[in-house]
Image (tube, grey):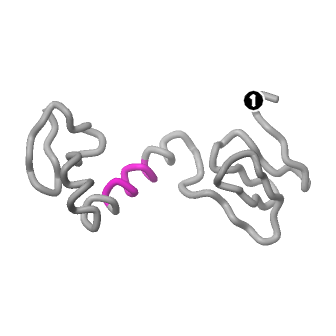
Amino acid sequence: MARCVVCGRQSPLIAASLGLCVDCIRQRPDQALPLAANVHRRARRQFDLPEAPPHRDPGKSCHLCVNECRMAQGERGYCGLRYNEGGTLRHLAGT
């Protein structure tokens, strides 16, 4: 059973990797959301994914999702599937 790092409450409904209860996320967002953002960045790093959508200038724009990444040469988009190769957007999977 995981414990909320904000209020200390224990519950089987708290994800151990996140360590936040739903009440703190909803009622104490000023404390909980920065912690959740740090966990999210760490998880993305583990999979070698960008921590935030890139918005480089100059960069090649991708409009396939709401993130609207703009990637510099050799950089990957937030999804990790699209990248800029020589000014052309390429994808690692799908069509």
The answer to if 40 sits in the magenta stretch is: yes
Q: Residue furthest bottom?
A: 57
Residue 43, position as x, y percentages in the image:
44, 44
Residue 1, located in which quarter of the rendered image? top left
Residue 83, position as x, y percentages in the image:
77, 47
**Residue at the location (21% across, 38% down)?**
14
38 left or right, relative to 87: left
Residue 48, located in which quarter of the rendered image? top right
Q: Nearer the viewer, residue 51 or 62?
A: 62
Q: Residue furthest front?
A: 27
**Residue at the location (8% across, 46% down)?**
9
23 left or right, relative to 80: left
Q: Nearer the viewer, residue 32 or 74?
A: 32
Q: Secondary structure at mark 1?
A: loop
Q: Residues within 10 Å of mark 1 (few under 14, many from 20)?
A: few
Q: Which residues are magenta?
A: 35-42
Q: Which residue is mark 1?
A: 93
53 left or right, relative to 71: left
Residue 95, position as x, y percentages in the image:
82, 29
The answer to if 12 sits in the magenta stretch is: no
**Residue at the location (78% across, 52% down)?**
62
Number of on-image labels: 1
Residue 71, position as x, y percentages in the image:
76, 58
Q: Give the amino acid type for the residue marked by disc 1 in the picture.
A: Ala
